[in-house]
C-alpha cells in the first residue's frame, strides 16, 4: 500500500530540480532540448523511485534503487562519451584541452544584429589544428596560432580571417603551406606548448600569433584560481617560477574526473558558472585589479619563451583581436617591442573603428568575429603581411 507521506518526502528533489527551476537559473533562461530531456528523465526516475520505496518498503525497494542508480550512472557516462566524438574540444593531458580532429559540422550562426548565416566548421586530421597542410606543395610554411578567435566555430573555414590572408598573399604571388592551430579559451602558455610540439615538423617561415586581451588573465594562476572559470582553471597549465604546473589538489583531481566522465556534473557546473557570470562576471574584481600588472609580467615571460623557440630567422608577427582596453593594448605592444615581434595593430584599429560605427562585425556573443568581421580583419592583416614579407631579405 502506498505511503503518501514517504512518497511526498522522496519527490522533494524534483521540486527543486525541474525544467522550471533550472530555466530560471540558466544563463539565457532557456534550456536546450537535450538538457530538457535529461531533466525530464531525472524527474521521471525520481518519481519512480519515490513510488517504489513508498509502496514496497525499504528492503524490497533497495534492489530496485541500485538497478536504477546503476542505469543512471551508465547512461550519464555513456552520453558524455558519445558527445565527445562531435565535441569541438576534448581533453588533453598536456594542454588541458585541444581542438578535436576530423570534424565536419554544420552550424547556424547569428550576428550580433541577429542576422542568420551558415557555418561549415571543420578541423584537420591532426588534433589542435583547424588546417594542417601535409601535402607541402610549396616551399614556405606559415603557422597561425590563436584562441577561440582562430579555432572557434564562429565562421566557416573559408570565411575565417586566415583564408582572407591567404587570398591576399596569393594575389601578390606568395604561395605557402598553411597550418592553423589554437583552442577556445587558450592562454599564451598553451599556445607556446602547441607551437613547441609541432615546430620542428612544420618548420614555419612565418608565425602569426593571434592574441586577445583576456589572455593576460588566462596566463596568471592567481587571477584564474579566484575566478568562476573552474572548467578552465582545473585543466590549464600555468607558468610559475619558470616551471609548468597544473592544479594538483584533491578538489582539482575530483573536479577533472567528474567533469570528464559525468554529463550531469558538467551540465550543472556550466549552468552554475553561467549564472555566476551573469551576476558578477568572470573574475574576483579585487584580486583581478591587484594582479593585473603581474599578468602583464607573466605574459611577457611566456612571449619570451616563444621568441626563444622560434628565433630571429622567421617572420614573427602578432595581432590583437580585442577592440577596447587601452591599458592592455599598451601592455601587449610593449611586450612585442621588447622581443622585437612585429605588431599588426592596424588590423585591431580597423575593428575598433567599425565597432564604434555600429557595423555588424561580431557573432551573436558580441565578442567573436562573424563572416564580415573576419573578412575585414583578414584582408587588413594580409595587406600588412605582404609589405613585411617584401622587406624581408630571407623570404
Image: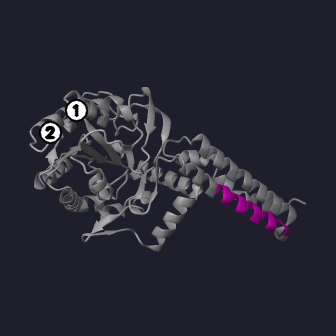
Decide which of 133, 209 is in the foreground and name it.
Answer: 133
Crowding at dot 2, Cα within 10 Å, few <14 / some 14-19 / many 20+, comes out as: some
Q: Which residue is mark 2?
A: 389
| Labels 2 & 1 near each other (Cβ < 8 A) | yes
Q: Quadrant of the N terminus?
A: bottom right
Give, as a single range, the part of the protein colored magenta: 60-76
Vertical relation: 369 (above or below) 151:
above
Label 2, label 1: how far apart the Cα atoms are: 10 Å
Q: Position of residue 220 (x, y in %)?
A: 29, 62
Identify the image quadrant of residue 311.
Answer: bottom left
Q: Position of residue 384 (x, y in %)?
A: 16, 35
Asked which secondary structure carries label 2, the reply is helix
Crowding at dot 1, Cα within 10 Å, few <14 / some 14-19 / many 20+, comes out as: some
Magenta-highlighted stretch: main secondary structure? helix
In this rendering, position of residue 170 left or right of residue 247 = left
Vertical relation: 388 (above or below) 359:
below
Name which residue lies at 69% across and 50% down.
41
Name which residue lies at 31% across and 42% down.
136
Q: Is residue 165 magenta?
A: no
Q: How is the image coloured?
A: one colour
Q: Position of residue 73 (x, y in %)?
A: 66, 60
Q: Which residue is mark 1?
A: 169
Amino acid at each position: 500500500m502506498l505511503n503518501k507521506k514517504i512518497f511526498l518526502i522522496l519527490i522533494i528533489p524534483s521540486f527543486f530540480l525541474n525544467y522550471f527551476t533550472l530555466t530560471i537559473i540558466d544563463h539565457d533562461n532557456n534550456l536546450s532540448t537535450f538538457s530538457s530531456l535529461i531533466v525530464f528523465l531525472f524527474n521521471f526516475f525520481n518519481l519512480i523511485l519515490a513510488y517504489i520505496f513508498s509502496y514496497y518498503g525499504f528492503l524490497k525497494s533497495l534492489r530496485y534503487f541500485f538497478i536504477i542508480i546503476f542505469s543512471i550512472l551508465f547512461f550519464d557516462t555513456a552520453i558524455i562519451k558519445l558527445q565527445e566524438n562531435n565535441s569541438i574540444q576534448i581533453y588533453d593531458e598536456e594542454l588541458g584541452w585541444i581542438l578535436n580532429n576530423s570534424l565536419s559540422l554544420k552550424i547556424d550562426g547569428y550576428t550580433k544584429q541577429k542576422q542568420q548565416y551558415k557555418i561549415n566548421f571543420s578541423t584537420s586530421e591532426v588534433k589542435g589544428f583547424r588546417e594542417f597542410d601535409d601535402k607541402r606543395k610549396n616551399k614556405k610554411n606559415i603557422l597561425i596560432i590563436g584562441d577561440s578567435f582562430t579555432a572557434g566555430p564562429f565562421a566557416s573555414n573559408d570565411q575565417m580571417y586566415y583564408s582572407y590572408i591567404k587570398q591576399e598573399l596569393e594575389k601578390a604571388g606568395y604561395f605557402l603551406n598553411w597550418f592553423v592551430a589554437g583552442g577556445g579559451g587558450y592562454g599564451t602558455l598553451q599556445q607556446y606548448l602547441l607551437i613547441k610540439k609541432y615546430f620542428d615538423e612544420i618548420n614555419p617561415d612565418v608565425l602569426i600569433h593571434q592574441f586577445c586581451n583576456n589572455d593576460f588573465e588566462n596566463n596568471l594562476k592567481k587571477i584564474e584560481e579566484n575566478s568562476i572559470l573552474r572548467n578552465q582553471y582545473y585543466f590549464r597549465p600555468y607558468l610559475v617560477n619558470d616551471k609548468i604546473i597544473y592544479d594538483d589538489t584533491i578538489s582539482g583531481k575530483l573536479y577533472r574526473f567528474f567533469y570528464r566522465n559525468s554529463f550531469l556534473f558538467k551540465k550543472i557546473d556550466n549552468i552554475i558558472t553561467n549564472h555566476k557570470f551573469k551576476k558578477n562576471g568572470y573574475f574576483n574584481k579585487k584580486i583581478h585589479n591587484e594582479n593585473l600588472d603581474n599578468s602583464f609580467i607573466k605574459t611577457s615571460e611566456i612571449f619570451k619563451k616563444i621568441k626563444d623557440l622560434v628565433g630571429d630567422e622567421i617572420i614573427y608577427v602578432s595581432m590583437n583581436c580585442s577592440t577596447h582596453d587601452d591599458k592592455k593594448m599598451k601592455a601587449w605592444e610593449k611586450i612585442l617591442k621588447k622581443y622585437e615581434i612585429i605588431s599588426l595593430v592596424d588590423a585591431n584599429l580597423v575593428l575598433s573603428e567599425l565597432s564604434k560605427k555600429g557595423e555588424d562585425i561580431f557573432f551573436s556573443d558580441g565578442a567573436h568575429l562573424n563572416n564580415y568581421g573576419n573578412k575585414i580583419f583578414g584582408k587588413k592583416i594580409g595587406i600588412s603581411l605582404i609589405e613585411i614579407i617584401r622587406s624581408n631579405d630571407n623570404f
